[in-house]
Image (cartoon, grey):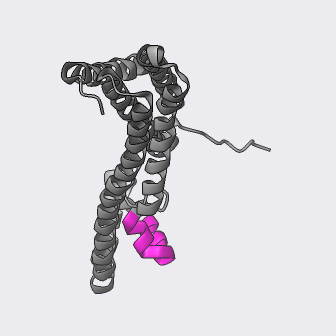
């Protein structure tokens, strides 16, 4: 009896992976940069922590709002496209059948077989067939605004909590170097895990994340030191 062949592709996880990595990465970089900027201005330990908590809350809410608006716009576009397709199927089913068959022929299926496939799929669920093969909309990839908003807010908050925890534990004299080292370590781990999960080059992923994040933190610390304003 032949064994059932199942394949797992790294692309299957790209969507959620991208959102999780983006949120956590932003949380670490923005919060660590904020902490370093305030610390470099000779602020008190309490003021640094207050700024870090405010950055975590504001950043999480901003990520949630931005992601919700963006994905909701995508959902509205998908809904409008499906409504239009539904109307076209009602008004001109023969033309829509020919269009679907032509799509399959362009993918290399023989004309006679393409006609049979189009007929069978439209008989089963015409809208689903056209939404997938003509519009590229599937159930798994459809926009979910609330889910995207909560996921982005949560991943940002988790990432932001890491440098904030370091700032809470580290003594004031060693706060800046400790925050820098630990934040870059967190970012390197995150970049490596993301690259591994996505099947990309791990070293390149780590270097890319840590390099640009180090520049961001250095810029924030430089501005804090330059103005030297106690919060």
Q: Quadrant of residue 78?
A: bottom left
Q: Is residue 39 visible?
A: yes
> Extreme bottom residue here?
91
In the image, what residue occupies the spot 28% across and 73% down?
A: 80
Quarter of the image with the N terminus is: top right
Q: Main secondary structure of the magenta part?
A: helix
In the shown orientation, is residue 69 left or right of residue 118? left
In the image, what residue occupies the spot 36% across and 24% down?
A: 39
Q: Is residue 22 visible?
A: no
Quarter of the image with the C terminus is: top left
Q: Give the percent coordinates (x, y) of residue 98.
A: 30, 70
Q: Give the percent coordinates (x, y) of residue 26.
A: 38, 36
Residue 108 lies, with reference to residue 124, above or below; the image says above
Q: How many marks?
A: 0
Residue 103 lies, with reference to residue 212, above or below; the image says below
The answer to which of 227 and 27 lies nearer the viewer is 227
123 inside magenta stretch: yes
Magenta extent: 116-131
Residue 25 lies, with reference to residue 54, above or below; the image says above
The answer to which of 229 and 152 lies nearer the viewer is 229
In the shown orientation, is residue 175 left or right of residue 169? left
170 inside magenta stretch: no
Q: Quadrant of residue 29?
A: top left
Q: Quadrant of residue 77?
A: bottom left
The answer to which of 42 and 220 lies nearer the viewer is 42
In the image, what residue occupies the spot 31% across and 60% down?
A: 69
Q: Give the percent coordinates (x, y) of residue 100.
A: 34, 66
> Extreme left residue here?
227
């Amino acid at each position: 009896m032949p064994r059932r062949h199942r394949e797992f592709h790294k692309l299957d996880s790209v969507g959620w992976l991208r959102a999780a990595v983006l949120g956590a990465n932003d949380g670490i970089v923005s919060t660590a940069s904020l902490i370093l900027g305030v610390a470099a201005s000779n602020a008190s330990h309490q003021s640094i922590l207050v700024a870090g908590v405010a950055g975590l809350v504001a950043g999480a809410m901003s990520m949630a709002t931005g992601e919700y608006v963006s994905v909701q716009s995508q959902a509205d576009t998908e809904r409008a496209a499906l409504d239009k397709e539904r109307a076209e199927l009602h008004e001109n089913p023969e033309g829509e059948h020919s269009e679907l068959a032509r799509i399959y022929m362009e993918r290399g299926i023989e004309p006679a077989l393409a006609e049979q496939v189009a007929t069978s799929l439209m008989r089963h669920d015409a809208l689903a067939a056209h939404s997938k093969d003509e519009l590229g909309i599937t159930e798994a990839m459809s926009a979910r605004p609330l889910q995207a908003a909560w996921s982005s807010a949560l991943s940002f908050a988790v990432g932001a909590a890491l440098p904030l925890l370091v700032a809470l534990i580290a003594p004031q004299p060693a706060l800046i170097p400790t925050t820098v080292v630990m934040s870059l370590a967190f970012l390197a781990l995150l970049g490596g895990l993301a690259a591994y999960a996505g099947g990309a080059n791990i070293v390149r992923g780590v270097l890319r994340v840590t390099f640009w994040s180090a520049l961001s933190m250095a810029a924030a610390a430089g501005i804090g030191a330059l103005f030297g304003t106690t919060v």
